[in-house]
Amino acid sequence: MSIERSWCPQCRKWVPAKLMNYDYDDDGRLLRVCTPCLEGKETSYIEEPEHETVRCVWCDSTNVKELAPKWNTYWCNDCNETFRRV
């Protein structure tokens, strides 16, 4: 039997889904954080630091910003290029 896991963007680890907490901020954005992060506890869960990292298609930099309201369109702060992630 496998344990269902969820990604915590705070600690950048895959944690058991039952430990995830979800809420919305004042702008309506979904907030996700695991219980160990809220409690300030270290864990040995599976870490994947590159998960959800967007890289520039031109220079491979991770110094990018998503352009709202054009979702999936990014601006690279290093090479000053715009690109879409499909």
Image (cartoon, rainbow, N blue to C red):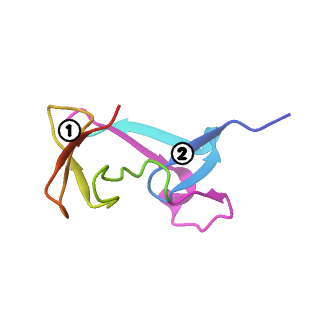
Identify the image quadrant of residue 82: top left
Which callout, 1 or 2, points to the residue nearer the camera? 2
Q: CA distance from mark 1 to mark 2?
A: 22 Å
Residue located 44% across and 56% down the image: 10
33 w.r.t. 77: above or below: above
Q: Which residue is mark 1?
A: 26
Q: Reading the chain from its start, which is encountered first: label 1 or label 2?
A: 2
Q: Position of residue 51 (x, y in %)?
A: 50, 51
Amino acid residing under circle 2: Trp
Q: Is residue 8 magenta?
A: no
Q: Which mark is residue 7?
A: 2
> Residue type at mark 1?
Asp
Q: Residue at x 54, y 42 (%)?
A: 20
Q: Residue 42 magenta-drawn?
A: yes
Q: Where residue 37 sits in the image (x, y, percent)? A: 50, 59
Residue at (68% x, 64% y) in the render: 44
Q: Which residues are magenta?
A: 27-49
